[in-house]
Image (tube, rainbow, N blue to C red):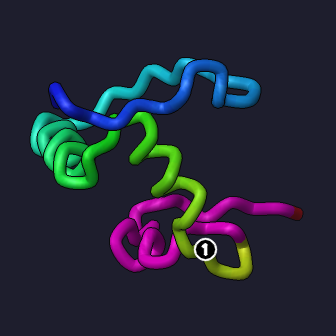
Amino acid sequence: MSNVRRRDRGSLVDARKVGLWIEGPADARLTALADAADTTRSALTQWLIERIDVDANGVPVGWTSDHPREEELPIDTR
């Protein structure tokens, strides 16, 4: 990432540092995608978050089908 186009200094509004744990292959893919886009991992992550499609409940499209909740116990709400 030596020739990466970085964000302009001071261009972030209300900047936050976020610490996340992700698996090695996902980390490598994020790096590869950012390199291919000639940007930083941070800028790419923000771009992805801003553009992800969500359903009527605000859940990312595809999340529910990829993460079924079959093993959850029923909750009595009486």
Per the picture, the main secondary structure of the magenta-coloured stretch is loop
* Numbered disc 1: secondary structure: loop
For the point 43% across and 77% down, which residue is it?
62
Q: Which region is colored magenta?
A: 58-77
Residue 61, magenta (yes or no):
yes
Up/down of 56 relative to 31, above or below: below
User: Which residue is at the front of the view, 26 or 44?
Assistant: 44
Above or below, 28 against 71 in this view is: above
Q: Identify whether 16 is placed above or below 64.
A: above
Q: Quadrant of residue 54?
A: bottom right
- Residue at the spot 39% in from the left edge and 79% down from the top edge: 65
Judged left or right of residue 22, residue 28 is left
What amino acid is labelled 1 in the image? Val
Q: Position of residue 61 (x, y in %)?
A: 50, 77
Residue at (26, 46) in percent of width and height: 38
- The correct choice, above or below, for 70 with respect to 25 in the image is below
Q: Locate residue 59, reporting x and y percent.
A: 60, 68
Please name the residue that numbered disc 1 is placed on.
54
